[in-house]
Image (tube, rainbow, N blue to C red):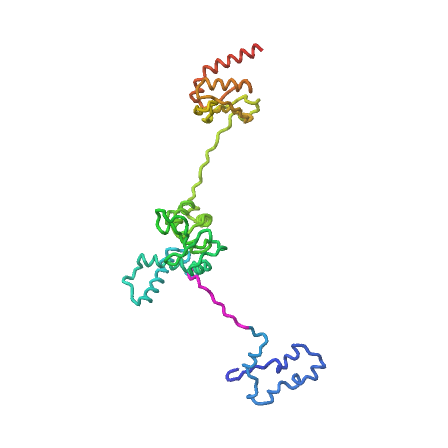
Amino acid sequence: MTKGMAWHHVPTDLNPADVVSRGCTPKELLEHSLWASGPPFLLKGASNCPSLSDAVKNLPERRSTAQIGTVGTDISINCKFLNSFDRLQRAFAYIYRFISNCRAKSLPSTIYLTVDEISFGTVLLLRSIQQVQIAVEYEVLSQGKPCPPKSKLISLRPILSSEGLLRVDGRLQYASLDYESKHPILLPKDHPVTRAIIVYYHEKYFHTGPQALLAALRQRPLGGRKFVASVINKCVRCFRMKPVAWEHVMGSLPAERVQPHPAFHTAGVDYCGPFYHKSEVWNKAPHKCYIAVFVCFSTKAAHLEVVQDLTTDSFIAALRRFISLRGSPRTIWSDNATNFVGAKRELAELKELFLSELLSE
């Protein structure tokens, strides 16, 4: 129905509807000529209609436009192979081939991707990420200036390599390692490509653990212990195949350990050392000595005695000193060492001696 009609714009000051919509008293409405008669251009020809271009130029709501420039775009974000690092490598290898063909104006010798094209395509991928995600440091280092002192990467002493990648400088200049190991490539830890690299090498090394994977990744372009562990924890295959370690069930404690008894009623003995005792004579070499440790089974009390050597006589002397201070224990446990075995006969005699002393008292 509107085919062939000519449409025109009516400005606010010539629009009768705006008289009421913008507020007007009844007295002002009766005396308003625009409301009563309409706009004057209606009584004239079509050539007197108001121009649309003039109305647009005089709009008070019109705002000034501003142009915003961006440094670059991370083209890997919109790639459909974002979750697969090997496919990303091949995709950017084809991009690198296209760029090379445009510059050389010649077709490749083979339709299959070469190792060099995949390597240069990977460099192109990582460089595009660094130019956007680490833009400030990349721009400064590309101009030959040092890294800003307030940068988060200042402790890594980043450098710009010949292929245009930010790498860690480090202190391994003279180490017998390859260039990739001495100068790892810097990548943001929260980037999807970094996660894809971790998943790729995690599967390549047969679902290895966090420590082994981190050691392998430090020879390649990234690091980060917590981020690597978080990626491995989300691996479904590792979660399903994670073995449950059986814990050895400890046996019940002996009755002497859990029942109340006087101190050193049941005791254990063992040696620690050797220690070196310096002689009072200044030109003599230090002598070895040991410590006999007596431990009460009930109270965990400990008694220490200095022992001159590992002979049976030295142990018997230490045992006499122990009994004279702590009393005669009912049972003594040991690890059946040679000096303890040799003391069996002396201990029997010592027991009879103490029994005779008790009877005499």
Asked if one can make out residue 255 in the rendered structure from this viewpoint, the answer is no
Residue shown at 48%/56% (left/top)?
A: 148
At which x and y percent is residue 177?
35, 48
The answer to whether 36 is drawn above or below residue 355 in the figure is: below
Based on the picture, tell me whether residue 195 belongs to the magenta stretch: no
- Residue found farthest to the right: 27
The answer to whether 222 is drawn above or below residue 260 in the figure is: below
- Residue found farthest to the left: 109
- Residue found farthest to the bottom: 44
Residue shown at 44%/63% (left/top)?
A: 73
The answer to whether 233 is drawn above or below residue 296 in the figure is: below
Question: In this picture, which residue range is highlighted in magenta?
Answer: 64-76
At which x and y percent is residue 231?
44, 50
Picture quadrant of residue 117? bottom left
Asked if one can make out residue 314 in the rendered structure from this viewpoint, the answer is yes
User: In the image shown, does 53 or 319 lie closer to the viewer?
Assistant: 319
User: In the image shown, does 146 or 12 lie closer to the viewer?
Assistant: 146
The answer to whether 261 is drawn above or below residue 226 in the figure is: above
At which x and y percent is residue 33?
67, 85
Picture quadrant of residue 187? bottom left
Q: Main secondary structure of the magenta part?
A: loop
Residue shown at 37%/55% (left/top)?
A: 86
At which x and y percent is residue 290?
47, 24
Based on the picture, tell me whether residue 75 belongs to the magenta stretch: yes
Residue shown at 46%/54% (left/top)?
A: 190
Total of numbered circles in the picture? 0
| Quarter of the rendering occupied by the C terminus | top right
Tell me if 95 is positioned left or right of 259 in this view: left
Tell me if 26 is positioned left or right of 41 in this view: right
